[in-house]
Image (cartoon, rainbow, N blue to C red):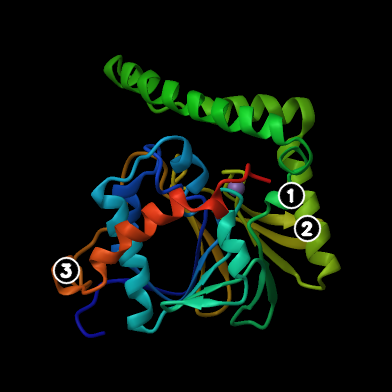
Amino acid sequence: MPGSRKTHYRTVWLSDIHLGTKFCRVERLVQFLKAVRCDCLYLVGDIIDVWSMRRKWHWPKDHTEVVRRILKRDLKGTRIIFVPGNHDELFRAYHGLQFGGVEIRNEVIHTTADGRKALVVHGDVFDAIVRHHRLITMVGDWLYDVLLAVNVHFNTLRRWMGFGHWSLSNYVKQRVKKVISFISSFEEALARYARQKQVSVVVCGHIHHPELRDVDGIQYANCGDWVENCSAVVEHHDGRLEMLRFGPEGPMPAVLEDDEPAPTEDPHADLIEPMIVSLAVSPAAAGSPS
Ligand SMILES: [Mn+2]
């Protein structure tokens, strides 16, 4: 588009945005969405944290703005594919359907510009803890929230004292890794599954650990999250994948021009909030996460 300063990628993958929680870095995400354009956008699960919203309602205006900005993209020719995660698993019932320009697929194969097959899946089914120990997961989820909440205040104190940002939950995850090597076994499980599916690339999320590397001959790409890492996986026009990491603080891509329509020009903007409310109260979402 003439005059547009957006960076144009062939594909953008985002996961673990966790809209509906106070931990989502909404301002940074909006800035990212303003700065990039893509032919194909994959939302790789845990986009709307229905699970968390059912426990505690949290939906400020700017969360609606994120949903609106994402939904508007199909008008500009972006193909949008939503691969639900465990925090928005009620959408898994709609596998294969399309709503307002968003295709819902529980897992999907993307073909890169250089002809490689990339399996896109959230990844929670490979999380043995999530899969087999429901109770541990629920306590773990609560514990994760507590750790993040503590971390927010901890970093305020650290900033006040002149120290940089320090991630408590990352620290804990690193400790956990030492005990059960959770992250590496997750990565190996995904790579193994990709090989079974006869693809050479796997793109996932779920563990909030951004990564782009070779795992046993498979290119493993984990989108990370928009809670702490503020990260995305992108595909360039030659098929090359890149990890973008902006972190919880510091510079984001400069936005010189925002060509999105204003909410007042969007006839569907008023429908987003009622839709979100219905997600949080619908009986389909009442079950415990699995
Ligand atoms: Mn997840």
SS at badge 3: loop
Q: Amino acid at mark 3?
A: Ala
Q: CA distance from mark 3 to mark 1?
A: 41 Å
> What's the amino acid at mark 1?
Glu
Q: Nearer the viewer, residue 49 or 35?
A: 49
State how far apart marks 2 and 3 are (Cα).
42 Å
Which amino acid, mark 2?
Ala
Where residue 7 appears, as percent x and y from the top left, is 35, 71
In which quarter of the view is residue 185 placed?
A: top right
Q: Which residue is mark 3?
A: 262
Q: Residue at x 32, y 58 (%)?
A: 274
Whether residue 43 is situated above or below residue 47 in the rendered picture: below
- Say whether disc 3 or disc 1 marks the residue closer to the N-terminus: 1
Residue 239 x %, y %: 58, 76
Q: Quadrant of residue 105?
A: bottom right
To which residue does mark 1 refer? 187
Does residue 33 appear in the picture of this structure? no
Which numbered disc, 2 or 3, marks the residue closer to the eye?
3
Dot 1 lies on which element? helix
Residue found at x 30% / y 71%: 6
What residue did someone put label 2 on?
191
Label 3, ligand 1: CB separation under 8 Å: no
Q: Quadrant of residue 53?
A: top left
Tags 2 and 1 touching, CB below 8 Å: yes
